[in-house]
Amino acid sequence: MASVVKGALYLMLLNGCINNIEKENSDPDTETEGQDSSEEQINSDGESPTIISADAWCYRIEVGGLVETWKFIAEATDPQGTETLSTYIPGGVTFMSSDESEIDSVALICNEGECSTTVNATAFDAYCSEVDDYKVRFLITDENGNESEPRTIDTRLGADENG
């Protein structure tokens, strides 16, 4: 009888260990019951870039006539060093309506953690008088393909190309 109880306890212990191993080896990106698939997964691998700050503004400049321009800037870091950040990030800036519907995206150019791009307002058909109607989402990548968490901000009216 004692050997039967010991055997049952051994099987229960073994089953618990196997379940723990399965949980540790399961794919965190696989949707499980109770997970909301609409939530973005946070990449906590310790290797992904981080957006430290971001800004987006529209400004007017006189160049043979009034030209309205959008400027997008972000500062980022990477655990492997800012020199590992991608220098050209297609779709690094997503221009959106205030309800976060995508209007268009443009490439972001980065140099050692300083990222920026400038776009003529006619490209988006979005002008300085409408800055309250838009948002911008930034995404930074590194040379290993790691992505930052997206960062969404409101746009603003700026005085010039420096903000």
Image (cartoon, grey):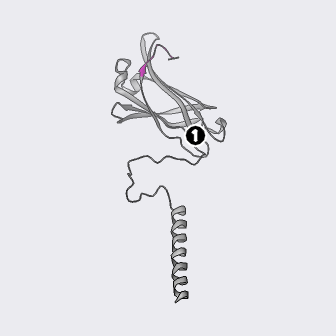
Q: Is residue 42 above or below residue 30?
A: above
Residue 72 falls left or right of residue 97: right
The residue where tag 1 is placed is 49
Q: Residue at x 52, y 47 (%)?
A: 43
Of residues 129 and 149, the one nearer the viewer is 149
Q: Is residue 108 above or below residue 58?
A: below
Q: Amino acid at mark 1?
A: Pro
Of residues 49 and 85, the one nearer the viewer is 49
Examine the structure image and report whether residue 158 is included in the region drawn in magenta: yes
Q: Residue 20 location, x and y as percent?
A: 53, 66
- Secondary structure of residue under mark 1: loop
Q: Residue at x 33, y 33 (%)?
A: 99
Q: In the rendered image, which quarter is residue 101 located in?
A: top left
**Within 10 angstroms of label 1, few (less than 14), some, or many (20 or more) residues?**
many
Of residues 1 and 83, the one nearer the viewer is 1
Examine the structure image and report whether residue 139 is included in the region drawn in magenta: no
Prevailing secondary structure class for the magenta stretch in the rendered image: loop
Q: Residue 89 location, x and y as percent?
A: 54, 37
Q: Is residue 162 above or below residue 52?
A: above
Q: Residue at x 50, y 33 (%)?
A: 107
Q: Residue 162 location, x and y as percent?
A: 53, 17
Q: Residue furthest front?
A: 2
* Magenta stretch bounds: 156-163
